[in-house]
Image (cartoon, grey):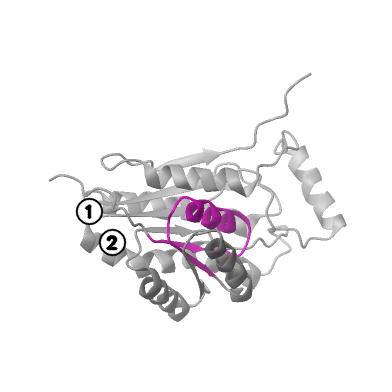
């Protein structure tokens, strides 16, 4: 059976669109003609972004989404589809970053990171996957992290959650084979976003010194969220019949003199 080609109109839901990689992805997709549902907890910020996109000639709607709340996820998907039509692309990247050594953080702090980055991602996936399978097309993109392959000190909970996400996506890809629905994961390296920017100077220095000690800080260059937005766009625009399953995006080292 021939693959169903991408339709001309491909509504996108971006979970975590209020800042960082999610915001950049929403802007990038909207600028290329995709109707975009901006989903996150900070609806006021989303409303401002939706207004910017609309004023620039794009199509966007702001919807409240808390990935830790199953009812919120269901409501956000329904609201997005009522406004834009059936979702053809879903980008799942909502999250924050809690820092602390594994022997200092609490079980509650650990569980919170897993709930946001892993279980939260699954909630969004589960809310939209059934209808995609029925249509025999659709793209789901998870935002992972290179910490799954290169764990960093002070990020035990985040590393565990993102490693779990890698495993989840591996299973999803196997189970979706033959359905017409594609799932992929984009794994960013060090990127300038708002995550972790609430740390005090002493904690930041201690963490970075540990990274250097274990050879995890090769250089000081960081990517911008736009680099990751381009990776997401590349993944979902691959023509039908091919499947870009994973993309690792790392910051280039500075040019030598």
| 20, above or below 242, in the image | below
Q: CA distance from mark 1 to mark 2?
A: 9 Å
Residue 85 marker: none
Farthest residue to the left: give it: 1
Measuring from the top left, give residue 64's x and y in whole percent.
52, 76
Query: In the figure, is residue 75 to the left or right of 51?
Result: left
Q: Answer whether residue 188 is visible to the viewer in this image.
A: no
Residue marked by disc 2: 132
181 or 24, which is in the foreground? 24
What residue sits 38% from the left and 49% below the top?
A: 170
Q: Residues within 10 Å of mark 2 (few under 14, many from 20)?
A: many
Q: Residues within 10 Å of mark 1 (few under 14, many from 20)?
A: some
Element at label 2: helix
Quarter of the image holding residue 20?
Answer: bottom right
In percent of the image, x 38 and y 61: which residue is there? 11
Residue at the disc numbered 1? 179
Residue range of the region highlighted in magenta in the rendering = 11-39
The answer to whether one can see residue 101 in this image is yes
- Residue 225 shown left or right of residue 128 in the figure: right
Mark 1 vs mark 2: which is more N-terminal?
Answer: 2
Q: Position of residue 15 (x, y in %)?
A: 50, 64
Q: Give the mark count.
A: 2
SS at badge 1 = loop
């Amino acid at each position: 059976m021939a693959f169903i080609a991408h339709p001309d109109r491909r509504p996108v839901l971006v979970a975590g669109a209020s800042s960082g990689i999610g915001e950049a992805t929403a802007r990038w997709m909207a600028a290329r003609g995709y109707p975009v549902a901006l989903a996150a907890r900070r609806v006021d910020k989303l409303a401002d972004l939706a207004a910017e996109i609309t004023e620039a000639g794009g199509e966007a709607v702001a919807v409240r989404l808390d990935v830790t709340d199953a009812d919120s996820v269901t409501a956000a998907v329904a609201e997005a589809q009522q406004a834009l039509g059936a979702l053809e692309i879903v980008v799942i990247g909502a999250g924050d970053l809690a820092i602390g050594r594994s022997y200092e953080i609490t079980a509650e702090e650990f569980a919170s990171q897993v709930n946001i980055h892993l279980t939260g991602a699954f909630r969004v996936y589960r809310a939209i996957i059934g209808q995609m399978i029925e249509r025999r097309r659709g793209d789901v993109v998870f935002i992972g992290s290179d910490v799954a392959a290169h764990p960093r000190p002070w990020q035990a909970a985040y590393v565990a959650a993102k490693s779990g996400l890698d495993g989840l996506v591996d299973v999803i890809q196997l189970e979706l084979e033959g359905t017409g629905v594609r799932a992929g994961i984009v794994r960013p390296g060090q990127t300038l976003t708002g995550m972790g920017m609430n740390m005090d100077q002493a904690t930041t220095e201690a963490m970075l010194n540990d990274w250097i000690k274990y050879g995890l800080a090769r250089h000081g260059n960081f990517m911008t969220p736009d680099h990751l937005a381009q990776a997401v766009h590349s993944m979902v625009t691959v023509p039908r019949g091919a499947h870009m399953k994973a993309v690792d995006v790392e910051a280039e080292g500075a040019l030598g003199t």
